[in-house]
Structure formats: C-alpha cells, structure tokens
Image (cartoon, grey):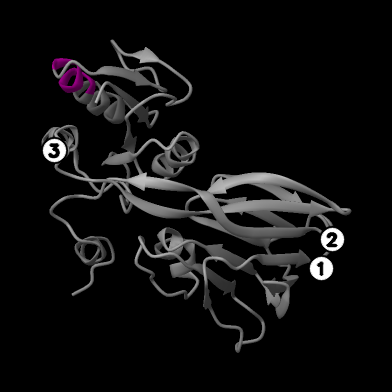
Amino acid sequence: MRRVFLFVKDSEEAKKTAGNIADFLHEKGIHVLSQVNVEGVECASEPKDCDLMVVVGGDGTFLAGARMASRHRVPVVGVNEGRFGFLTEIERNEAKEILEMIIEGKIKPKQRMMLSVFLERKGKRHFIGNYLNDVVISKSNIARLIETKVWANDHYMVDVFGDGVIISTPTGSTAYALSAGGPIIYPYKEAILFVPVCPHTLSNRPVVLPPDFSIKITVLSKNRSSFLTLDGQKGTFLKEGDTVIVTKSENYCLTYSHPEKSFFDILMKKLRWG
C-alpha cells in the first residue's frame, strides 16, 4: 500500500482523528492525501491512483466518499466521527489496529451494490450519477400528496398516491427505507428495494426486486410539487411528466468491514435489537 486518501468531515474532532491516522500512515511510509485540510497532509480533490480511502466522519461523509471512491475502484473504510455510524463501523480508538490489518492484507474488501440514476424529460435522457444508499421521490410541499406511476422492467407495477417512493440498495435498506416500513436486506446481497412512503392506499407495500430490473417512476403531479433526492445529499425539483429511471450500477462500493463485528452486531447496537 503506497497511497491513502483521507476523506474527512469538516469538524475539529474529525480533523484531529484524521491527523492521528495520517501520522500513523506516515510512520508506515505511506503517502497520505486528504480532501479536507488536515495539518501536514497534502490536499487533493480525487482519490485517483490511491490504494485506500479512509473516511473520517459519519454516514453522510461515508456516502459522499463512497461515490467518489467507486469511480476509481478504490476501497473504503469508515472511522466513526458522526452520530449514528451505520457505515462508519470503526471507532477512533481501534482505527490504527484495523488499518494495520488492512495494510498487511489480513482483511479483504467486499462489494456493495450501487444504483445508476437517469432523468428523462421531454424525450431526452440524462445520466444523474451512481449512488450507494437510495433514490427518493418525495413531496416538496408539506400538506400536498404526490402521484407517481411505477414500472418494473417495462411492466406496469403500481400508481402511488402519497408522500413519495424510495428505491433503495441493500445498504440503504437500513436508512430512510427502514423508517418507511421496508425490510432490512443484508448489505452484501444484490437486490433493488421499492418502498412507498405513506401511501394513500394501504395495500401498497414494499417489494424486493431482482438487481437486474429497471425501475421507472413517472411524476404525474404538477411542476415543482415533487423533489428527487439522491443519497439524502443531492437533489432537484421534478416536473410533471418527468421519469426517473433506476438501474443497478456497473460501479461497486468496495468496503472493509469491521473484522470482529458482524452485521447483526451492528443492528443490535444501532437499532437496539435484543
């Protein structure tokens, strides 16, 4: 391992933790780059030609870093300096020990599925990006409901009249999709999860679909009454007649899991199971 990219939350605690990690990596003879200004570390905008991205922050920081790292097939490990820490599995006091294991090749990265998103407007299709968590079409006005028409693999599926719809990866199944009543899917499986949000028809239920399906959602509501949100971080208003197309991405997020915690350990801690 020659080059490591630090992707750091803009907080003093995260920068302090990142500085300690950078010192540790320098001692190992590893060249360190970062995106947020960490003292003594060269800044860079992309992890190109890096062997590892270390995210220091919370789940939001991890999602932003994962989108960037996946473009270059750089594996990611998360050190928790956030509130929840579903994706940033490693605590700061164990970061050096686990990084040592990664450097020595004792831990191997695993693949997490991502979603590709396209927006079709007036007959023209535009690529929006690749996302690790979810794609959400929701109402933009507090008191208004929106109506969408949904197809799965060009087969008509359902009309949803309610607060919106969520299309999620297995990784995103423990995020907004979970709070909307969706199932938890093991994060290293491949599937596409469809979850209606507060549907007016109570028979509209979450559906787990094969990963090779294409999901199309057409907005039937008036202009600017609905909003497209991607990974909870990026978004745009939608117009009547817009169609959002979601497919499995060719990109994967390569992640290092905690070597001593299973996914079920994380569920017990974060969701207080048991």
Reading the image, the residue beneath label 2 is 240
Mark 1 vs mark 3: in front: 3
* Residue in view at x 42 percent, y 26 percent: 47
- Taking the image as drawn, is residue 232 in sight? no
Reading the image, the residue beneath label 1 is 220
Q: Amino acid at mark 1?
A: Leu
Reading the image, the residue beneath label 3 is 101
Region rendered in magenta:
22-27
Q: Is 26 part of what is drawn in magenta? A: yes
Image location (x, y in percent) of residue 18 = 26, 26
Q: Which element type, helix, strand or loop, lies under badge 1? A: loop
Image location (x, y in percent) of residue 267 = 26, 65
Q: Which element type, helix, strand or loop, lies under badge 2? A: loop
Marks 2 & 1, CB-CB < 8 Å contact: yes
Mark-to-mark CA distance, 1 and 3 = 52 Å
Q: Amino acid at mark 2?
A: Glu
**Of the image marks 2 and 1, the number of the one nearer the N terminus:** 1
Q: Would you place residue 36 above or below residue 226 in this image?
A: above
Image location (x, y in percent) of residue 101 = 13, 38
Mark-to-mark CA distance, 2 and 1 = 5 Å
Q: Amino acid at mark 3?
A: Met
